[in-house]
Amino acid sequence: MKKIVWIFIIALIGSFVFVAVNNFLKKEPNPNLEKGYTEEEVAVIETLSEENKNYLLETNYHPNLLEYFAVENMMEEKLINYIQFHETYGLNLNETVYIVNHNYDDLNVYDESTIAFMHGDYYIHEYLNRYLAYQTQLTVSFDSVETMRDYVITAVNSNLDYAFYTQDYAVDLEKNELILVNKYYKLPSDYVPENLVKIEYPYGVSLMLQATVYEQYKLMWEAAKSQGLSLYIRSPYRSYATQNTLYNNYVARDGKAAADTYSARPGYSEHQTGLAFDVTSPTTNFDTFEYSKEFEWLQENAYQYGFILRYPKEKEYITGYMYEPWHYRYVGVDVATKIHETGLTYEEYYAYYVR
Ligand SMILES: [Zn+2]
C-alpha cells in the first residue's frame, strides 16, 4: 500500500517536471509542421528559395512534396509550376515535370493523345492542333500509338496537311544556305542569288552556282577523283525564266499531273537558289546514275562537304518529288552531318531546327 503511494507521488512529480522542462524548451510551432508536412519535408522546405518557401507558406498542404524532388530533370525553380499543374490536371509527376519543363503547360485539356504527341522526337507545340486534326483524318492503321504519332508529326511538320502548291509561304531568304524551297515555300520570280559564280571545273558544264557551294563542290570532286571516281554536274543554277520554260515544256509533253512529280513549277525550284545541282558521272545518265560507284560514294561522303541527297527514296510523299539520286543540295557541313545521321528529309529538319 505504501509502495503504491510512493510510486504515485514520484510519477506525479516526474510528469510535472517533464511538462515544465518541455514548455521551457518549446520553440515557436513550425507552421509547415502544423499544416501536415513531415519533419523531413520541413527540412527540405527550409533549403528552398524564398519564393518557393513563401508559396508553400501561403498555400494549403501539398501532399507528397518530396516526390517532386525525385523526378528526373526536376528544376527547383519550377516547383510552383509543377505543383499548380499537377493539382489542376492530376497527371503523374513524371508527366508533370516533362510538360512544365518543355513549356507545354498552356493547354486546357490533356489526354492520352496530346501527351503521346508531346513525347514525339520532333514534336512542335504550336502544331498540336494540326497534329490532332490530321490524326482524325488518317485512313491507314498503325501497329502502335508511337508509330502513328511519328507519322503524323512528320506529315504535319512537312505541311502535308495542306495540298501541294496551296500555301505559297514566302521563302525566308535570311536563312541563307538553310532556306527551304519546296511545294509550299516559293521564291519571288525576280530572285537571283547574289554570289553566283561560273563553274568550269572539270566534268562540269559552264554554268553557275553560289560561290560557297562551288568551292565545296570542288573539294568533293577532288576527293571523289582521288578514289578514281568522276562527278559531272549536269544542271546547277536555273533562273525563274528557265524553270518556267522547262516546266511548261514538260506539261505540254506529259500533262500537268505527271510534270508535277518530277519538275518544279517556276518559283518552287531549288535550282533557282544556286544551292543545288544535278550530278551524274560522265558515263551515266539520270536513269543509271543510281547504280554507279559515284552514287555509292556520294551516299557515304557528300555530307562531309555539306551536301544532302534532297529527294530520297521512300520520302516522295514528304518532299513531293520522285526519288532523285542525282539532285544534291548544299546546307553546310554541320547540318548535312546531322541529316546524314538522322535520316530526316530537309522538310522535317527545317521545321524542327531552322524555321
Ligand atoms: Zn535537280
Image (cartoon, rainbow, N blue to C red):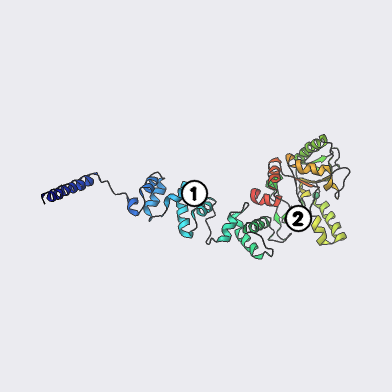
Horizontal arrangement in the rendering, residue 38 relative to residue 110 (left or right): left
Tell me where residue 26 appears, x and y as whole percent.
Answer: 25, 46
Image x and y of residue 346, in percent: 71, 50
Name the residue at 88% across, 59% down.
253
**Residue at position x 70%, y 46% from top?**
339
Q: Quadrant of residue 60?
A: bottom left
Distance from disc 2 to disc 1, alpha carbons, whole Å, reads 42 Å
Q: Decide: marks 2, 1 in contact (CB < 8 A)?
A: no
Is residue 150 depicted above or below 235 in this figure? Answer: below
- Find disc 1 in the rendering and name its residue: 71
Residue name at image x 85 percent, y 57 percent? 250
Q: Is residue 352 above or below residue 110?
A: above
Residue at disc 2, secondary structure: helix
Question: Which comes sooner in the sequence, label 2 or label 1?
Answer: 1
Instruction: Identify the image quadrant of residue 139.
Output: bottom right
Q: x, y percentage for residue 229?
A: 84, 38
Q: Secondary structure at mark 1?
A: loop
- Check disc 1 and give the amino acid type: Val
Q: Nearer the viewer, mark 2 or mark 1?
A: 1
Of 283 and 175, the residue lying toward us = 283
Callout 2 amino acid: Glu
Q: From the viewer's perspective, is 104 left or right of 157?
A: left
Task: Answer few, some or many: residues within 10 Å of disc 2's Cα (few below 14, many 20 plus, some between 14 and 19).
Answer: some
Q: Residue 162 is drawn in which quadrant?
A: bottom right
Judging depth in this view, the residue of 268 and 352 nearest the camera is: 352
Spot the residue most to the right.
Answer: 283
Q: Which residue is mark 2?
A: 316
